[in-house]
Amino acid sequence: MKLRSSIFIMVFILTSGFTAFGQDTQRVSEALGNVSEGLVGYIGVAAQDLKTGKQVFLNGDDPFPMASTYKIAIAVTLLSKVESGELSLTKIIEIKDEEWVLSDIIASNFIHQGVALSLANIMEVMITHSDNTATNVALRLAGGPAAVNDHMKQLGIKGMHMDRTTSDYSRDFYGQEPGRENMKEAIKNLSADPAIANDPQSEFEADSKDKSTPRAMLNLLTMIYEGKVINNENTAFLLGIMSRTVTGPNRLRGLLPGETPVAHKTGTLGGIANDVGYITLPDGHRFAIVVFTRGSATPQSDRDRAIAEVSRTLYDYFVLISE
């Protein structure tokens, strides 16, 4: 029988004591593999205490499909354009008919032509509800995948690349054409086969597109938090949006103590279940965390549980070593 994550870490610390830090983190990495075993296909983890700089990795340099976690890179690129004066958060942006794809807010609620939102609201629903129509608009304003990749390179982020719009995802994964006129058909097709959204597609996951290593995403998160990517005002704006995320409530948040502040972005597609962001510890400081998974044929609840177990394991570890 597996030990619960928090119990595993407490037993490890109390019975073996602190050794060299590298050995400690290796034991924690083993715990991460233990608590997620059988719940997901393959998992990658990266985490960093943002006060001490201590890091933990599990398969940290392996590439994983980012799914919707790539929206953080889009948001950073957009906010850099806001800082340069190219864009404004209050600018009203018209959503083009061809940019509509299945999405929780825009395509599900605004069925008529003539939808226009401020850039701030587009970014809000792109992150908090992972709205894919909003993401198409945001990516257009950012300059497309190539522009986001160039910006990541300028920041020194290695091991991350974006290749597709959410329209491309609609075609490549669902076999569904985007566009407002196609939304009724798209909803009908998904309703007829709802399992398709969570069924793994090995060929889709194996292609080289839209991949990141856990380490690369962690580097982006730490640079955001340290103010090395955007100014303090826009950093607070982005972290505020991430703190209002409603998707994946049973992932990073799932096993944490009640009311623990979490700012995060999920990603879900086929056999992919991801969650990345920041968790606040009881003393007020935070750690950044990346949990990527792929190839999971397990129920969605198991995938969520794996991420929750990893999150709680790291929470307990960083609490214990800071005491």
Image (cartoon, rainbow, N blue to C red):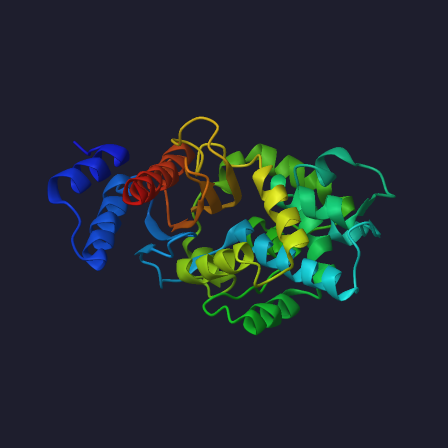
Residue located farthest toward the right when viewing the structure as drawn:
114
User: Measured from the top left, where is residue 83 in percent x and y?
Assistant: 73, 62
Q: Quadrant of the C terminus?
A: top left
User: Measured from the top left, where is residue 103 in percent x and y?
Assistant: 66, 41
Q: Is residue 156 left or right of residue 146?
A: left
Which of 163 and 79 lies nearest the eye of the viewer? 79
Q: Residue at x 59, y 46 (%)?
A: 239
Q: Is residue 99 left or right of residue 302?
A: right
User: Measured from the top left, where is residue 174 in percent x and y?
Assistant: 57, 48
Which of 209 and 247 lies nearest the eye of the viewer? 247
Residue 165 appears in the rendering = no
In the displayed structure, 323 sits above or below 85; it is above
Q: Quadrant of the N terminus?
A: top left
Q: How many marks?
A: 0
Residue 97 appears in the rendering = yes
Q: Is residue 115 left or right of residue 41?
A: right
User: Measured from the top left, where is residue 223 in percent x and y?
Assistant: 52, 60
Residue located farthest toward the top when viewing the structure as drawn:
258
In the displayed structure, 233 sits above or below 113; it is below
Which of 105 and 107 lies nearest the eye of the viewer? 105
Residue located farthest toward the left when viewing the structure as drawn:
15
Q: Is residue 236 left or right of residue 159?
A: right
